[in-house]
Image: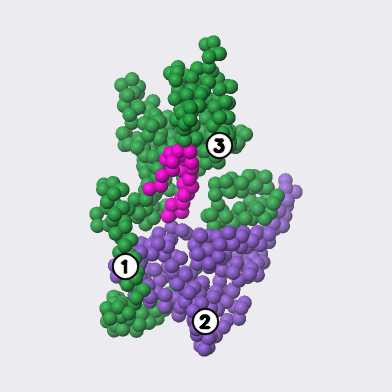
């Protein structure tokens, strides 16, 4: 989905010319990704939405300078991150309605109907559980790369970690999912052989 | 099997971060462990399925109200206009404006000096990115659309600043291996002096040195369409494992009177080397110097680029000698010695110039 970063760039170009339609398109394109990212830091749905909305407000206010941004994805995610961290630091007085950890972690990645992948719903549950058992940072990395299609370098910049960490964390996550699968497939193929 | 490495390779492939070597390594592992293939398929299925986006109309409506309140206007909500008084309160904006202006000036400057004016569409500020690889080295780059390019020695690749958004077009002089990021809406076009290659998503090698007689396109996977510039009617579609060899302009002109036009253009099937399990055309990516039934003249041109030296063939009759060999990590001296043993040549090194002449002990 890295072609998306091209799409984002061309939208920003139009926004910098004051095109409200492009602005709406960008909101629809990125809101959910940025919202989920904010949620991973702030753990409050209402605040997460507020933060992303704030970033979009700022985007419109400084629209004339948008074409100077080299890596729009990194810029937007970093803005969300900084704002969320600011919020955690400054606004402790606010009453934040926290989600229970399980609640917000679940919403980071939602896998669809198991029949779409030709696997049983039981196995799907196991896969979802494996993803949910990943350490928080690892889960965020998994989401940014898988769902948002960001590159290791982009994720590294956004999260202020090394690309190697991104690579390792992701490799661990994929392995965790992969290791749930083996028995199932192997049994199937041996059954076929017996019949023959 | 090293499970950790296996899943690392799978994760790299899924994230589109795997290098060519890593993809080959994964392929080999899957070949040795076919029982893993289905697991990888299931994971890939899960990976490529993106979570659907919820309906955002309410959220956007709410956002617009906030934007209007903050920007202090009550006008029609389609314009989201911010009054100048508020704009002035944004020091960051002024800074960014300045930055944007200086970037624009920089691009203008670059266009002025480096770009070909024909390529700039009117009303748009564009610039050319040029990647140059000197003799004696190689380079791997990733283009803004995610396409990976391996550039061989003495090569140049140009792409437009607008590359990622409008047209995926590059100009190549020299040799490169492309692993094109699939995007069915935007074809990827490679221009060389003799041909234009149009592709969607595929991997292939292009060899188009201006100082060589032939331009070669070697397809590994996918499909490409090639248009020959001096014969635009002729479109050639290559299938995997095929290569197209065409005579370059100057050379073609000199042959025009003596040969039929069709002889200037040949489609060949590539031959995999059983030991390396790869075609010689793309071995350079893995740092292997391969000669596949090539004349000494061509061999020397490759050596010149590979080792950044100048080679003079002192005896015209030697130029037609044919060599087939694969070298990996050898010094120039070892390569030349190997060539010397296998045929009737000898050589002499004078600083950066190598003279090749007929072996005095050769009786022919």
Disc 1 target residue: B98
Q: Within the magenta stretch, is there residue B139?
A: yes
Q: Which residue is mark 3?
A: B288
Which quarter of the figure has residue B7?
bottom right
- Give residue A116's position: percent from left, percent from top: 57, 62
Q: Residues within 10 Å of mark 1 (few under 14, many from 20)?
A: some
Please tell me whether mark 3 sits on a helix, a strand or a loop.
strand
Within 10 Å of disc 3 (Cα), the crowding (few <14, some 14-19, many 20+) is some
Is A121 drawn above or below residue B87 in the view shown? Answer: above
According to the colouring, which chain is purple?
A
Q: Could you say where residue B147 lies in the image, as x and y percent from the top left?
A: 46, 50
Q: Which residue is mark 2?
A: A89
Instruction: Give the chain of mark 3.
Output: B
Host chain of mark 2:
A
Horizontal relation, residue B363 to residue B317: left or right? right
* Residue depth check, mark 1 versus mark 3: number of the one nearer the observer: 1
């Amino acid at each position: 989905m890295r072609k998306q970063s091209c799409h984002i760039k061309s939208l920003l170009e139009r926004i910098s010319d004051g095109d409200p339609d492009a602005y709406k398109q960008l909101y629809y394109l990125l809101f959910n990704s940025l919202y989920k990212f904010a949620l991973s830091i702030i753990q409050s749905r209402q605040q997460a939405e507020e933060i992303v909305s704030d970033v979009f407000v700022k985007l419109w206010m400084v629209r004339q300078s948008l074409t100077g941004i080299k890596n729009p994805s990194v810029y937007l995610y970093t803005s969300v991150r900084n704002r969320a961290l600011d919020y955690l630091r400054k606004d402790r007085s606010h009453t934040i309605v926290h989600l229970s950890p399980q609640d917000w972690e679940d919403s980071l990645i939602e896998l669809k109907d198991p029949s779409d992948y030709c696997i049983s719903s039981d196995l799907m549950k196991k896969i979802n559980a494996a993803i949910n058992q990943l350490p928080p940072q690892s889960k965020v990395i998994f989401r940014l790369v898988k769902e948002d299609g960001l590159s290791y370098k982009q994720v590294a910049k956004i999260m202020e970690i090394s690309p190697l960490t991104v690579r390792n964390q992701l490799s661990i996550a994929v392995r965790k999912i992969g290791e749930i699968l083996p028995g199932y497939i192997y049994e199937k193929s041996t059954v076929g052989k017996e019949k023959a | 099997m090293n499970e950790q490495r296996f899943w690392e390779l799978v994760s790299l492939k899924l994230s589109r971060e795997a290098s060519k070597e890593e993809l080959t390594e994964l392929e080999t592992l899957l070949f040795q462990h076919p029982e893993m293939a289905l697991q990888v398929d299931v994971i890939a299925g899960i990976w490529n399925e993106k979570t659907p986006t919820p309906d955002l109309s309410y959220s956007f409506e709410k956002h617009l109200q906030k934007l209007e309140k903050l920007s202090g206007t009550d006008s029609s909500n389609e314009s989201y206009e911010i009054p100048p008084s508020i704009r002035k309160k944004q020091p960051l904006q002024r800074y960014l404006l300045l930055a944007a202006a200086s970037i624009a000036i920089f691009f203008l400057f670059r266009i002025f000096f480096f770009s070909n004016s024909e390529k700039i569409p009117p009303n748009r500020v564009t610039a050319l990115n040029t990647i140059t690889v000197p003799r004696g080295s190689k380079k791997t780059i990733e283009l803004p659309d995610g396409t990976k390019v391996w550039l061989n020695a003495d090569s140049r690749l140009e792409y437009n600043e607008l590359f990622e958004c409008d047209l995926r077009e590059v100009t190549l002089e020299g040799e490169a291996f492309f692993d094109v990021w699939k995007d069915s809406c935007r074809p990827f076009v490679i221009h060389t002096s003799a041909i234009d290659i149009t592709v969607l998503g595929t991997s292939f090698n292009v060899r188009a040195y201006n100082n060589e007689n032939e331009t070669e396109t070697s397809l590994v996977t996918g499909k490409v369409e090639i248009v020959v510039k001096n014969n635009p009617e002729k479109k050639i579609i290559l299938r995997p494992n095929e290569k197209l060899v065409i005579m370059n302009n100057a050379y073609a002109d000199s042959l025009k009177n003596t040969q039929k036009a069709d002889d200037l253009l040949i489609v060949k099937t590539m031959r995999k080397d059983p030991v390396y399990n790869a075609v010689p055309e793309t071995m350079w990516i893995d740092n292997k110097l391969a000669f596949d039934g090539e004349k000494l003249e061509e061999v020397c041109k490759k050596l010149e680029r590979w080792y950044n030296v100048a080679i003079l063939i002192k005896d015209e009759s030697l130029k037609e000698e044919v060599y087939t060999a694969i070298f990996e990590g050898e010094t120039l001296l070892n390569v030349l010695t190997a060539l010397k043993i296998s045929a009737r040549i000898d050589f002499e090194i004078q600083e950066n110039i190598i003279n090749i002449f007929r072996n005095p002990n050769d009786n022919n």
